[in-house]
Image: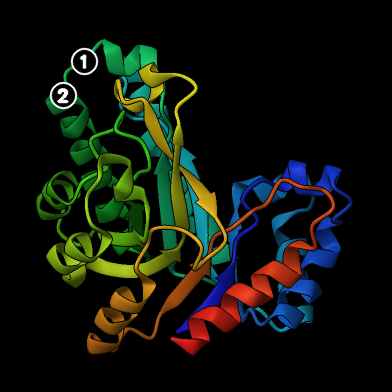
Amino acid sequence: MKFSFMPLNLPAWSSQGIEFNKMFDKAKSAGFSAYDASENDLLFATHREVCRLCEDAGLEIADYIHWMHVTTPDSVKFREAVDSAKAAVHTALEHGTNRLMIVENIFHEDLAAMSRADAMNKLVDAFSEIVGYAALYGVTVMFEDFPSPALPLCTSSECGELLRSVPGLKLVFDTANMLALDESPTEFYTKLRQYVAHVHLKDVVYATSPDPSLTGGRKKMISRTLHGQGIVDFTALFKLLRADNYDGFATVEYSPSDVGIDHFKLLAESIRYFESL
């Protein structure tokens, strides 16, 4: 298993005094071997500069992350989103990776204008075209189980429907997002293990939702916490990953907001925690 570094909120990290071009050496020292590149990097550096920073620090680029919005009744916006994802195939290759993670953005006004089944159909249509195009260039397309009930991507049932509908599409297994609807991470993984191409290691606790309309009417929501301090059973999950001989990338996902915290010290502690399992 290769631990990958993904800064979740680059502008916030920058405001806390963490310089973008110095993150890479810090990540390598903390125990990371790879970096999750994304279009957010462009706020701080060109793609070419990101590749150079990773090379200088001795980090692989695990994947390239692109955001799109296809769950919309607007056919023009749908087409623009699909075309942007197809363009991201080439951006991934420019980063030296053949792995493209696509994240669907939530626009509640668009989702309110369609049924959940309609939203799923939009995702199937979009990913079918994107996966087919990416295959021409040897690129694997992945999506993540989503941490909000707003999209039909939060449960193993809905993620499984999309995966079965789009041959070749792969899953980024996030160890906590399904808890937004109280599904067990181990049960989720067991049902969809054959599709997993990348792992996001995240621990969470339940917190009170500030706006139940954003959490499907639920009064609680998941909130990130340091690994081993939340409700995710990593011991059980690592047994399953070992049984499947998983040796791919595992993104250590945690981003404390306290400016006084040494972020990379905590991330190094998380890596040591996972290695102990």
The percent position of residue 239, horizontal first and vertical second, equals: 28, 83
- Which quarter of the rendered picture does the N terminus lie within? bottom left
Residue 114, label in figure: 1
- Looking at the image, residue 104 sits to the left or right of residue 26; the answer is left
Location of residue 222 with respect to 25 vertically, above or below: above
The percent position of residue 258, horizontal first and vertical second, equals: 76, 47
Please say if the residues under marks 2 and 1 sit with CB atoms less than 8 Å apart: yes
Q: Amino acid at mark 2?
A: Asp
* Foreground residue among 227 and 59: 227
- Kindly identify the residue that appears in the image at 34 percent across and 68 percent down: 233
- Looking at the image, residue 56 sits to the left or right of residue 144; the answer is right
- Quarter of the view holding residue 32: bottom right
- Kindly identify the residue that appears in the image at 71 percent across and 46 percent down: 257
Location of residue 72 with respect to 135 vertically, above or below: above
- Which quarter of the rendered picture does the C terminus lie within? bottom left
- Quarter of the view holding residue 194: bottom left
Location of residue 110 with respect to 218 vertically, above or below: above
Give the structural element (helix, strand or loop) at label 1.
loop
The percent position of residue 226, horizontal first and vertical second, equals: 57, 61
- Kindly identify the residue that appears in the image at 84 percent across and 53 percent down: 260
Is residue 232 visible to the viewer in this orientation of the structure?
A: yes
- Quarter of the view holding residue 4: bottom right
- Looking at the image, residue 156 sits to the left or right of residue 149; the answer is left
Location of residue 243 with respect to 16 vertically, above or below: below
Give how far apart the Cα atoms at labels 2 and 1 are: 6 Å
Residue position for label 2: 118
Give the structural element (helix, strand or loop) at label 2.
helix
Q: How is the image coloured?
A: rainbow
- Kindly identify the residue that appears in the image at 49 percent across and 88 percent down: 276
Q: Amino acid at mark 1?
A: Met
The percent position of residue 93, horizontal first and vertical second, equals: 52, 65
